[in-house]
Amino acid sequence: MTAEDNACFIVSYACGWSEDDAEGEKGFVGFTKAMDYAANDDAAKARLDSVRQAKLDKGQYAGVVFSPLERSKVEPDLVMVFCNPAQLMRLVHGAT
């Protein structure tokens, strides 16, 4: 997925694909309130603060690849595992 493929404002901001940080932050707050992800400005700004901690620098990456590990055609920089607590416990036990 690249900036041209993306339609989500939150992803554009977090991936460093938004045009201007000041406008991006204003748009982020407005978008999260409009989509009912946040009840008010304070909640939207708190969400913005949490996203800001992981925000990528503008132009740092041109795109993101999502694919199953067993069929991926690229060497991943990051592997995310989604699981419930019981599955996580088994993963930790298996790794140790």
Image (cartoon, rainbow, N blue to C red):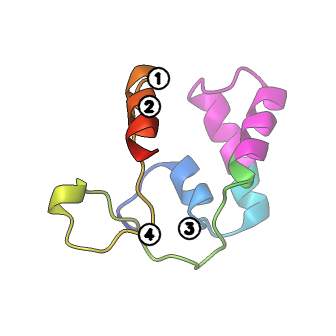
Give above or below for 20 relative to 84.
below
Q: Amino acid at mark 1?
A: Pro
Q: Earlier in the sequence, mark 4 or mark 3?
A: 3
Q: Secondary structure at mark 4?
A: loop
Residue closest to the eye, 53 or 96: 96
Question: Residue at left 17%, top 57%?
Answer: 70
* Residue assigned mark 1: 85
| CB within 8 Å, label 2 to label 1 | yes
Judged by its main secondary structure, the magenta piece is helix
**Percent of width and height locating residue 22:** 79, 61
| CB within 8 Å, label 1 to label 3 | no
* Residue assigned mark 3: 17
Q: Secondary structure at mark 2?
A: helix
Give above or below for 94 relative to 72.
above
Question: Residue at left 75%, top 49%?
Answer: 26
Q: Earlier in the sequence, mark 1 or mark 4?
A: 4
* Residue assigned mark 2: 88
Q: Which dot marks residue 77? A: 4
**Percent of width and height locating residue 94:** 37, 40
Q: Earlier in the sequence, mark 2 or mark 4?
A: 4
